[in-house]
Amino acid sequence: MAHTHSHGHGLGSHEHKHHHAVTETADARKRVAFAAALTFAFMIAEVIGGVVSGSLALLADAAHMLTDAGSLALAWLGFKLAERPADSARSFGWARFKILAAFVNGILLLLLAAWIIFEAIQRLLDPAPVMGEILMGVAVAGLLVNIIASFLLHGGDQEDLNLQGALWHVAGDLLGSVAAIAAAFVIMFTGWMPIDPLLSMLVAGLIIFAGVRITLQSAHILIEGVPSGLSPGDIKADLEANLPDAAKVTHIHAWALTEQKPLVTLEVVARDGACLDTLRREVKMRLQETFGVDHSTVEVHKAPHLP
């Protein structure tokens, strides 16, 4: 059976996009590093403030910031490893490690939310006095720190799941600071202590939303699910309708190395008289221009002649 088979994907274009991706990764890595250092430094101040004031909202936010510092460090490691080139043992390099980092960060968000809810329930059952003035001062400072960290991370590529996970951790911190400020305001002017754990539970609910989202998206990539917006059925229909020499498209597999790098493999049965190599190039170009797939493996062969 005559056939042609290729793993290529347009060298010039690929090199340009690879350089662009490496530059974006380096920028994201620096942003995450600054945010991690800032978060860890203020976490110490929040622990002291939470212990002195007796505020669960502050201690919960401090715990959140501690896990965030670790999560941001993990995100930084994901970006750092993603910059390493492919080798004989890892033909795609370490690019997927940042998806694994995003998955771990999503799980950490869920565990953190569970801890905050547990502590809030304990505080509601056994109320403790809270020093509103200290709570307010530390919470306002925390809000400023989290705004700076969010600004740093918002400047990166928002399609990057690893950066999304880092940003949601910081966003959770920011919400925690807002909740602590609200709790301090209520305590200072009304003396109603339950507001502190109640607002902590509200923040925990928002953290759960983010944790579930990040975990599901990264898990989908890790189990090699079909990328969003890339349907094998649509690929088949498009190629067969728009490429006259493609009689039939079969064995389509679509998955993703990272959220920004979809991969496709497929087979094409060529019509009689078609140039196999030309058809292969046409298929790859169509995949790139119509579906945004820069890395595809296309096998083209002639239909078998029945006796």
Image: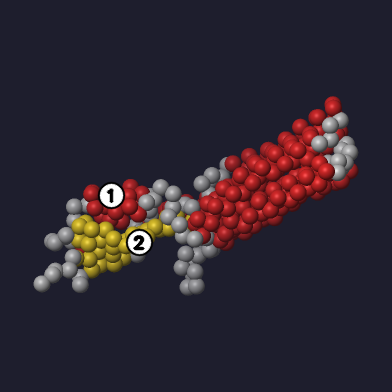
Q: In this picture, is 3 found above or below 232?
A: below
Q: Quadrant of the C terminus?
A: bottom left
Residue identified by numbered label 2: 265
Q: Label 1 is placed on what type of residue? A: Asp
* Residue 283 shows in this picture: yes
User: What residue is rendered at 69% in x and 53% in y?
Assistant: 111
Q: Is residue 294 left or right of residue 92?
A: left
User: What residue is rendered at 81% in x and 46% in y?
Assistant: 122
Q: Nearer the viewer, residue 176 or 148?
A: 176
Q: Label 2 is placed on what type of residue? A: Thr
Image location (x, y in percent) of residue 233:
33, 52
Residue at the far front: name it. Answer: 125
Image location (x, y in percent) of residue 105:
63, 54
Image location (x, y in percent) of residue 152:
63, 43
What kind of element bears circle 2? strand
Image location (x, y in percent) of residue 203:
70, 41
What kind of element bears circle 1? helix
User: What residue is rendered at 84% in x and 26% in y?
Assistant: 189
Residue identified by numbered label 1: 238
